[in-house]
Amino acid sequence: MRYALYTGCVAKGAGRELLTATTYAAERLGIQLNEMKDASCCGAGVVDDDNRLLADSMNARTFSLAEASGLDIMTICGTCQGVMRAAQKKIDGNPDYKARVNAALLKDTGRVYAGKVKIKHFYQIIHEDYGLENLAARVTVKLAGLKVAPFYGCYVLRPHEYSDVKVPDRPDYLEKFIETLGATPVDYPEKLKCCGFPILMSNKTNSLQLSGNAILGAIKAGADCIVTPCPLCQLNMDSYQPEIEAILERKLGLPILHYPQLLALALGATLDDVKTNTHIVRPNKALHEASD
Amino acid sequence: MAEVRFLVSKYNSETDAKPRLQEFRLDPPQGATLLDCLNLIKWKLDGTLSFRMSCRSAICGSCAVRVNGHARLACKTQAADAVIDGRVTIEPLGNMTLIRDLVVDLEPFWASVEKVRPWLVPDDSKKYERERLQSHHDQLKIDAASTCIMCASCFSDCNVMEVDPKFLGPAALAKAQRFVFDTRDAEKWDRLELLGQIHGMWDCTHCAECSTRCPTDAKPLERITELRRAAMAAGMTDNNAARHVLGFRESIGGFKGIGGSGMLNENYLPVRSMGLSIGGILSLIPVGLRMFARKKNPPLIPHVIEKVGEVRKMFRRFDEYNKEGEK
Ligand code: SF4
Ligand code: SF4
Ligand code: FES
C-alpha cells in the first residue's frame, strides 16, 4: 500500500506531532508514504471566501501532481480532506467548470487535472483499504479502560453532498476505530458539532465557547480524552484550553489527541514517541495508564 | 409498514418544568410523510398535540421540526426514511424558546431577517417609466436565495447561533445575498457594510449545518461565501476576518514583490488578522508564549513548497481568476 501523503500546513507548522505520529503508525502498518513536497495549501475554505476559481485550481494542481505520480492522495487533516473533496466533486460534476479550471491550470503550471485521483483521509484508508480486522491483528497495546470521546469536525461530515461518510448524521468511523484499539468510545451530542476554529481570529469568544461546549460534553460523558481527525479542531481545543477554561469559569484539563496519535499508541508508541509533550494539555493519569 | 415508535416531544409551559418525550405507536400508511403521522397521532392518540402546518407540500415553511436531532420539514420527509431501529424522534426546532410541544417562538428568527432590510431599495435619483427588467444572467445570481421558504431549519441548527443569539444567522444572510446581488438594488454597499460588522457574515464558522438542513436551493453557506467574495472584491477588508483572508492570500501567493511560500504562514496569519490593533496583537501573546514553551510554535523560517513558482504565478493572476470564476 502506497499513497501520496498530503501533509497540509498544520502538520508542518503548529501541529508537527501529527506528522510524527502519522509516520510512526504508517511504518508499523506497512503503509508507504511519499510526501508531496510540491503540493500547496488547500486553502482551508478561506481562499474560497476570496476567489473560488483560484482555490479550486490550486487544489486541482495538487490532484494533478498526485496523478503524475500514479498514487492516490492520503490526507491527515479533516479540513484539507473536506476542502479537497468538495473541490474535486465540484470540478468533476461540471464539465464546463472543469474546462475553466484546467485552462487556468495549464496556463500557469503546464499541468492538467484528469479526474482519476482518489483523495482519502488516513481514517478512511484504515477503514476502507487497510481494514479494521487487519488493524486489530496489529494492535500491540490494548488501550483497555481508556474512555475516548470521538470528535469528527465539520469538514468530514458537511455539507453532506461533499462528504464521503455514508450516513453523516450518524457516523461510526471513529467509534469503531476506538473499539478496534481496545478503548471505549463515549457518546455525547457535541461530537458532530463545530469546534469554532475558523472564527478564532474574528470572534474569539464564540469560537472558544464552541470548543468549550464540546470539551464539557465529552467530560460529562466520562471521557478521558478526545480524539479527532482534524488538527484544527485539535489546535482550538488544546492550545486554547486555558482561555476556554477562563470563559467557562471551570477547570477542564482534557487531553486532545490527533487520530494518528491514538493509533500509534495502540501500535506500541510511547506518549513521547507521539510527542504529547508538545500539547498544551498534558496527558492525564488515564492516558498514562492505558499506554504504559 | 410495520408499527413505528414515535417519540414526540411534549411540553406545556403551565404544568411542565421541561419537555419530555412521549411515545406513540403507529403503523404509518404506505407513502405517509412525517406530517401525516403527526396528524394521525393528533386525530387518534392525543388531541392536544400541538404543531405548525399549512401547505403540506414544502412551500409554506411551517412544519419544520427536529427529526432524530436535525431540522427537517415534516411534510417533505417520508416516515419510512426517518425510522431508525423502529423509532423516530420528533422534537421542536432549536435556538428558539419553546411555547408548546413542537411549537417554538419564531420571533427571534423574523427579527434577524428584518435586520437585513429584506426589500428592494430602488435608486431614488432615477425615474422609472416602467418595470425594470432583469437579464436572465442577472436573475440567476439571486435565484437560489429567492427559493427560501423561511422555514427556520437553518436558524435552528446553526452552531454559531447556539453560542451567540446576536448572530445574524443563516436565513438572514441568505436573504441579504438576494438583495446585495440584485442589480436593481441601490444599497449594495451599505448592505455589505452592515453585514461586515460583528455578528454578521464573518462570524459564520462554515459549519455547513445550514446548507445541509436547508430543504430548498437557498443553501445559506453558499450565499455567505458569495457575500464574502463580494466584500473582498470591493476591498472592504477593515476587519479581522477579512484581514485573515488577506493573510492566506499573501502567505500562500505572495505580497508586494515578496514571494509566497505556497503554504500558510502560521506566524504571519494571526498578526495580519489583528491589523493595527495593539490590543489584538497583545491578546496573541499568551498563546504564543505557551506554544513556544512547548516547542509547538510554527518554524520561524516558513516552510516553502517545491515548485512554488507555479503557485505564485497563479496568485499573480488573482483578478483574472476572479473574473473567469464569475462567469
Ligand atoms: S455555516 Fe455559518 S451560518 Fe451556516 S449554520 Fe454554520 S455557522 Fe451558521
Ligand atoms: S435558507 Fe433554507 S433552511 Fe433557511 S429558512 Fe430559508 S429555506 Fe429554510
Ligand atoms: S406544511 Fe408547508 S412546508 Fe410543510
Image (tube, coloured by chain):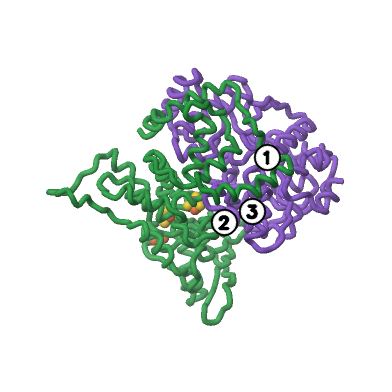
Chain colours: A purple, B green
Along the viewing direction, whichever of A205 and A268 lies nearer the viewer: A205
Q: CB atoms at circles 2 and 1 under 8 Å apart?
A: no
Mark 2 → mark 1, Cα distance in angstroms: 22 Å
Chain ID, mark 2: A
Q: Which mark is residue B202?
A: none
Chain ID, mark 1: B
Q: Nearer the viewer, mark 2 or mark 3?
A: 2
List the residue tagged with mark 3. A191
Chain ID, mark 3: A
List the residue tagged with mark 1. B297
- The location of residue B72, given as percent across then percent down, is 48, 57
**Kind of element beneath mark 2:** helix
Q: Nearer the viewer, mark 2 or mark 1?
A: 1
What amino acid is at disc 1?
Asn
Q: What's the residue at 56%, 27% (across, down)?
A: A62
Q: Quadrant of the N terminus of chain A?
A: top right
Q: Which mark is residue A205?
A: 2
- The location of residue A102, given as percent across then percent down, is 46, 24
Left or right: where does residue B82 sit relative to residue A285? left
Mark 2 → mark 3, Cα distance in angstroms: 20 Å
What amino acid is at disc 2?
Thr
- The location of residue A233, given as percent across then percent down, is 63, 47
Q: Is residue B19 above or below residue A69?
A: below
Give the class, few, some or many, for how many residues have Cα within 10 Å of label 3's Cα (few <14, many ≥20): many
What amino acid is at disc 3?
Lys
Q: What's the residue at 63%, 26% (across, down)?
A: A36
Asked whether residue B90 is in view, the answer is yes
Number of marks present in the image shown: 3
The earlier-in-sequence mark between 2 and 3 is 3
Q: What's the residue at 62%, 34% (across, down)?
A: A8
